[in-house]
Amino acid sequence: MKRVVIAAAVLSLIFAGLAFAAEGTQPTAGAAPSFEQMKANHLKKLDDRIKSLQEEKSCAQAAKDQDEMRACRSKHKAEMQGHGDEMRQRGGHGGMGGQVPSQGK
């Protein structure tokens, strides 16, 4: 009886260890976004930022006084804050749930 309990405990520890090790492995190739998808997503985000900055620039050029200039900046800042909220919901800078490796120097 004692041996059965010990064997069951050992087996449960082995299976728990295997399950824990499997969680740490890399996802399959089908689950991860491809390079082309990540590149297209990044380029779209850059285009969106450029568009937003061009709109802020046009607004600032058209401003006639300090209050209009502040309104331009506030509008742009609020828009950028919205993008930051989206990024936090996705889980960071990697986009599409992926992690971007650091470029250590």
Image (cartoon, helix red, strand yellow):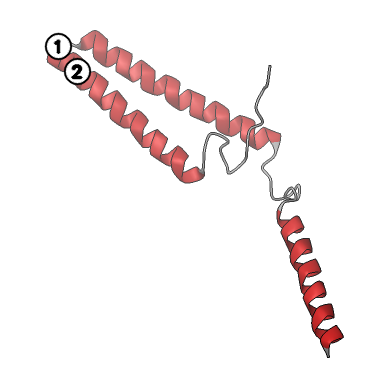
Inter-mark Cα distance, 2 to 1: 6 Å
Q: Residue at x 46, y 38 (%)?
A: 87
Q: Secondary structure at mark 1?
A: helix
Is residue 64 or residue 94 the one in the foreground? Answer: 94
Give the quarter of the figure containing the N terminus.
bottom right
Q: Is residue 43 left or right of residue 51?
A: right
Q: Amino acid at mark 2?
A: Arg
Q: Secondary structure at mark 2?
A: helix
Where residue 20 appears, as percent x and y from the top left, is: 72, 59
Q: Residue at x 62, y 40 (%)?
A: 98
Instruction: Please identify the residue farthest to the bottom as the structure is shown.
Output: 1
Disc marking residue 66: 1
Q: Amino acid at mark 1?
A: Gln
Check whether the beta carbons of the residues at disc 2 and disc 1 lie within 8 A of each other. Answer: yes
Q: Which residue is mark 2?
A: 70
Q: Is residue 2 above or below residue 11?
A: below
Instruction: Please identify the residue farthest to the front as the structure is shown.
Output: 2
The quarter of the picture where residue 5 lies is bottom right
Where residue 47 appears, as percent x and y from the top left, is: 48, 24
Q: Is residue 15 above or below residue 42?
A: below
Where residue 83 appears, as percent x and y from the top left, is: 40, 34
